[in-house]
Image (cartoon, grey):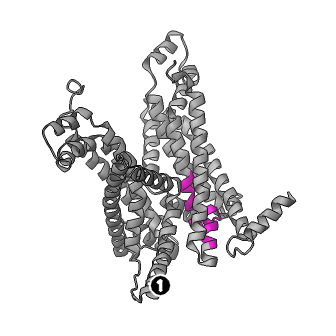
Amino acid sequence: MIDLQGYGPRLLEGALVTIELALLSLLVSVILGLLTASAKMSRSWLAHRIATLYTTLIRGVPDLVLMMLFFFGGQIGINMATDWLYYQFDVDIFINIDEFVAGVATIGLIFGAYMGETFRGAFMAVDNGQIEAARAYGMSESLMFRRVRFPQMMRHALPGLSNNWMVLLKTTALVSVIGLTDMVRVAEEAAKATHEPFTFLIPVAVVYLVIASLSEWFFARLQKRYDVGFGGEECNN
Amino acid sequence: MQQLNAWFTDLLAGNEIFTANTLGYYADGLATTVQLVFLSLIIGLLLAVPMAIGRGSSRPWIKWPIFFYTYVFRGTPLLIQLYIIYYGVVFVEGIQDTWLWLILEEPFYPALIAFTLNTAAYTTEIFRGAIKATNKGEIEAARAYGMSRAKMMRRIILPSAFRRALPAYGNEVIFMLHASAIASVVTIMDLTGAARFVYARFYAPFDAFLFVAAIYLCLTFGILYLFRYLEKRLLAHLRPQN
């Protein structure tokens, strides 16, 4: 076995932080993505414009720059807001941004833009006849979303979703730069302190590979599940 | 020129953060970022073409090592790859006595190596997909003309595969531009490095990072339009005629 020189437990904690961060950001990004997709498809001119601006700006700027902007700027922005509240209304509150929450919010916000594009394409790929049929059955909008649009949309969205998840997983490594103690940060500290970079960095790389491989397997199964009813070539017309 | 200079001084007058000095940092950062991205893309492309061909080879000792390489480099974060190369080169036995050390001592070259290997892995997969999607009829026609495999690759498969790969490769170029921000982590003064410096100096995150975000946005749009133009030119024969 490799000698982790006492960094083992901390690396494990870091790995848990990475996984929690990735899963929670995925949740945030999926919700934001669904909202963005519906805003982009809505008839409202303003909603469409705002959603387009959001996806264009986020996708045009590096993740790391956005992360630093939100992370370093977020605290100052909140301080300014609370100061203003104090001077204007004499309300004295103090909000300290938790690094983990900031990380989840930032990564969720970044990938919400990518998810939005994925979902929009998938929603548009759903056959119009299906929606007409649902309407003819007298389904309400929410029931139609739950029973017809969402399950059929997921079939088209899954390849993009899986791709976004893989990129998101790798992006979580960047939080180590802005001060969150994930496994990359622990490994980097350990590598510097012990002068044995390979001992710590390669196992961390392997953990990422394992998570990626497991997700690949999971998404393949999910795809099978959502492809039910579209199975063979003969019924896929 | 004098007028421009005067206009510029006027514009910056009274601005404490964006002086000619800090703008100089941003300009140097822009040059570093462009160099880093451009070089890694060019070298990565040169590496990717033979690997993409080899990836489709029927010989397992060619196919599997390439598959393993792309799998590892696409499955791990670029930051880890950069750390492994940046912190790792020092520990290669005897490297400090050779001429290589003069190059590798600077953080620019380890970053260039990491970026090149990373983009080569992604580009290999993009090209492999494009090569695999070649129309069977084109290959049959080339065979019927009696072309050798090398000639067929050069004249038939690669030209059409490159065109098919163009949109995906454009995304990869933008991805690489954005990934290059990571270089600032290993003390390289690229665009993001300049922004971090200005942030640390003036404690002005909005000014420092919004400005650099705007520069990245312009670069992204530039690349986007370049590739759209290329697609229009190179894929002209596929457009519907009317």
Q: What secondary structure characterizes most of the magenta part?
A: helix
| Quadrant of the rendered image containing residue B15 | bottom right
- Name the side, left or right, on which A151 lies relative to B157: left
| Quadrant of the rendered image containing residue A152 | top left
Is residue B183 inside the magenta stretch?
yes
In this rendered view, identify the residue nearer to me: A150 or A26.
A150
Query: Looking at the rendering, in which quadrant would you find the C terminus of chain A?
Result: top left
In this rendered view, identify the residue nearer to me: B17 or A193.
B17
Output the chain of dot 1: A
Bounds of the magenta segment: B177-198
> What's the amino acid at mark 1?
Asp
Q: Which residue is mark 1?
A: A83
Query: Looking at the rendering, in which quadrant would you find the N terminus of chain A?
Result: bottom left
Seen at 46% across and 40% down, the residue is B125
Compared to residue A49, the image places residue B47 above or below, namely above
Q: Position of residue A157 (x, y in %)?
A: 31, 44
Tell how many labels.
1
> Can residue B94 be seen in the rendering of this structure?
no
- Looking at the image, the residue that sits furthest to the left is A137
In this rendered view, identify the residue nearer to me: A103 or B36.
A103
Q: Position of residue B62 (x, y in %)?
A: 47, 36
Compared to residue B144, the image places residue B199 above or below, namely below
In this rendered view, identify the residue nearer to me: B5 or B196.
B5
Seen at 41% across and 61% down, the residue is A109
Is residue A73 inside the magenta stretch?
no
> Can residue A112 be seen in the rendering of this structure?
yes
- Name the side, left or right, on which A50 lies relative to B43: left
Q: Position of residue B16 (x, y in %)?
A: 69, 76
